[in-house]
Amino acid sequence: MPADVPARRPDAPLGYWLSEAFHTAYSGSAILSIDLRIVEGNAALARLLQFPVAELVGADLAQLVHGDDRQRSCTLIAELTPAAPSLRIEHRLVRRDGTTVWVEQTHTLLSGDGSSPPHLLSIFLDITERKRERASLTHQVFHDPLTGLPNRALLEDRISHAVARSARIGSLVHLLFLDIDRFKSINDGSGHAAGDELLTALSTRLRGALRAGDTLARYGGDEFVIVCEDGQPGDGVDLAARIEALLREPFVLGGREVLVSASIGIARARPGDDAHAMLRNADAAMYRAKQSGRARSVLFDDDLQAEAAARQGTEAALRSAIAGNELLLHYQPILDLGTGSVVALEALARWSREDGVLVHPGDFLAIAEDSGMILPIGEFLLDAAVAQVGIWRRAIPGAQDLGVAVNISARQFTAPNLVDVLGRAIRAADIPASAVHVEIAEDVIMDDVDRSQEICAALKALGVQLAIDDFGTGYTSLSRLRRLPIDAVKIDRGLIAGMTGAGQDRVIVHAIISLAKALSLDVVAEGVESDEQRDLLAALGCHRGQGFLWQRPQPTAAMEPWLISHLPLTP
Ligand code: C2E
Ligand code: MG
Ligand code: MG
């Protein structure tokens, strides 16, 4: 029991007990006059504020409230009336040593009687710890744990405020969307710790390029976003140039110097933009910077705006393409260079638009991929291709071993139901799984080799054959290639085109064929257009070829007579 509390007297009247309860209460308590002078204060309050009880009496509570909270608290207390006699306030009090303590203070108006004027009963609860926990929780919810920067949720809120303010007072808002170039290869090559080190070091460098008031946020993996308010029209471009200059200095990761570049998209708030529109525009500009060769910045302008609008139009039209039966397949034969026989048909997507235009995959697949529509579209095409080849295998004499090559996009490859989708298509078509050659582009399969290894193993367990498409354009190392359970590589069309004439790609094609042979993989050359290319490939030991030399991709109806005239498939 505190020393300044009177000793217990068992025979005392109620008034005495009330007084003792007040003085010994666990919570800080005070009786205040209406002008907030402390008339009585208990020991717990004295401990809370580090004052002796005697010094509390007569003190002005308003003066003990933190300067920033005082006005609000006094106003609220002044509003107490007999009809609304109590009130709870959270505010800071200043202790004798100048430190602050957060309290939840409950005031109750004691109306008094004729002889005694109204007073206030105040109970103080120390909530400093609760406030700290709440602040740290809020910090965690809105900040990235690695870099300590605002995360996506806080960023979107900041952009929304900036855009709303810009609409109100006509200020300028710039958004920079920055994506580290080839971050994946740093992560894969030097390890995740080095990747983390880079993200932290980069965030520190970026902070150095900003003005007070700018927001730097980590948007996702290797993406950062900067919001600049109240600037001049050229500020976004200037800031991007400053960042590019900062990146010329190498980073030291795991003791090694590494040069890093970034692609930056810049967007300026346009009338009617909200946070999402601004982010979308800056992202589109960043994407353009990547496409134009990385290590640069691009400003979202009218051209990009028009392109984005066209893209949205295509996306909308594509949405109704499946239902409207506008998606179909053309087929192109893959031949054995030794025997000249047809091994398989590659199924290639086409979009026969309402206006009669036949759109090639290069003009719609990226949009389907970005929007996620590739999943239903891919499944539809896969079913159609496998079913059609099943029909030909049964209907055309000599075609009983015909295979079908199907292309799988990045999203399809990592979709959790890929094996189910393929398995169902194969069972429905009633063909052996080994007749299906699944083609995955080199950049997709090499993006995350550990993950690809798992997916490929699951596909192999289904029984299909696996081929790496467009091989030779990426950065596949021998060791990574060996880890994947694949059956074939398809040499990229560009390399085949560069083999003859003044082209220098013959050495590369030769190296790929030797590599494939060493790993017991089949090699398919894509885009063979001339006898010269075919002869050269055969001489280098390439097994298979595909290209306009033999046949362009054909619709189903045209493919059938071609197949029949090229039978028997095996001489
Ligand atoms: P790919 O899988 O590498 O397909 C080969 C591409 O080369 C086809 O283009 C084909 O028409 C073209 N080609 C074949 N031989 C020659 C030749 O001798 N010379 C020239 N210049 N070109 C030749 P296409 O049909 O425009 O397809 C482009 C890409 O779109 C495909 O490349 C594939 O990655 C993707 N794709 C096509 N269909 C599908 C599909 O159903 N699903 C998915 N996910 N991707 C598809
Ligand atoms: Mg292909
Ligand atoms: Mg290809």
Image (cartoon, rainbow, N blue to C red):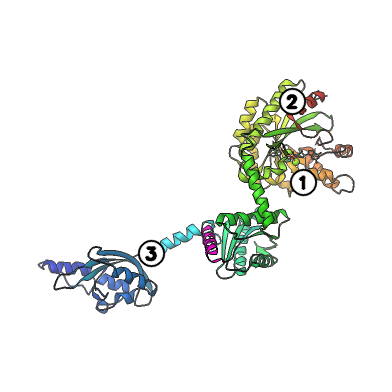
Question: Which badge, 3 or 2, comes first in the chain's sequence?
Answer: 3
Left or right placement of residue 3 versus residue 373 in this view = left
| Picture quadrant where residue 543 is located | top right
User: Which residue, given by chain and number where applicable, does mark 3 sit on?
Assistant: 129
**Magenta segment boundaries in residue numbering:** 154-170
| Picture quadrant where residue 30 is located | bottom left
User: Is 65 placed above or below 430 here?
Assistant: below
The type of residue carrying mark 2 is Asp
Disc sitting over residue 472 in the figure = 1
Q: In the image shown, does 115 or 567 lie closer to the viewer?
A: 115
- Which element type, helix, strand or loop, lies under badge 1? loop
Report if the beta carbon of the residue with label 1 is closer than 8 angstroms to ligand 3.
no
- State the CA–CA distance, disc 2 to disc 1: 29 Å
The type of residue carrying mark 1 is Gly
- Picture quarter with the N terminus: bottom left
Question: Which badge, 3 or 1, comes first in the chain's sequence?
Answer: 3
The type of residue carrying mark 3 is Glu
Q: Are marks 2 and 1 in contact (CB under 8 Å)?
A: no
Residue 567 point in image, percent of width and height: 81, 23
User: Which residue, given by chain and number where applicable, does mark 2 sit on?
Assistant: 401
Q: Residue at x 69, y 27 (%)?
A: 388
User: Is 560 placed above or below 465 here?
Assistant: above
- Picture quarter with the C terminus: top right
- Which element type, helix, strand or loop, lies under badge 3? helix
Report if the beta carbon of the residue with label 2 is closer than 8 angstroms to ligand 2.
no
